Image: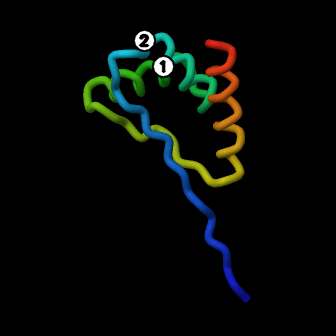
Amino acid sequence: MVRRRKIKYSLVLYNDSVNSFEEIIYLIQNIAGYDLTRAANIAHMAHRAGKYKFMSFDSKISAHVTQVMWRDIVTGK
């Protein structure tokens, strides 16, 4: 019997000069379900360090994360 390993994904937030803190905080809240304080702390950590891995998940959750990200891109939120 062949065992299948669960595929792990990581969501890494990179600091850039294009997106505002408000946009990033909004996305973190919608993707990860974090409250405002936690999302703001993650945004600030990415800003200071240049990048921050804030979420790891398996393939079941990846579809949800992708759907949320594309929805926000298409609607311009």
Residues 58 and 72: in front is 72
- In the image, 49: left or right of 34? left
Tell me the kind of residue under disc 2. Ser
What residue lies at 42% left-to-right and 41% top-to-bottom?
53
Residue 66 position (above or below residue 10): above
- Mark 2 in CB contact with mark 1 (< 8 angstroms): yes
Q: Residue 1: x and y, percent?
A: 73, 89
Tell me what residue is drawn at x 59 percent, y 32 percent: 32
Q: Residues within 10 Å of mark 2 (few under 14, many from 20)?
A: few
According to the image, label 2 marks what residue?
Answer: 20
Please give left or right for residue 10 compared with residue 63 in the image.
left
Q: Is residue 14 above or below residue 77?
A: below
> In the displayed structure, would residue 60 be above or below residue 50?
below
Q: Residue furthest front?
A: 74
- Quadrant in the picture for residue 49: top left
Q: Residue at x 39, y 15 (%)?
A: 18
On the image, the x and y values in percent for residue 27 come to 56, 22
Kind of residue at disc 1: Ile
Label 2 sits on a secondary structure element that is: loop
Residue placed under numbered mark 1 in the picture: 24
Q: Measuring 50% from the left and 41% from the top, which residue is drawn there?
A: 11
Alpha carbon of mark 2 to alpha carbon of mark 1: how far?
6 Å
Question: How did the renderer colour the structure?
Answer: rainbow
> Few, some or many C-alpha atoms within 10 Å of disc 1 (few <14, some 14-19, many ≥20)?
some
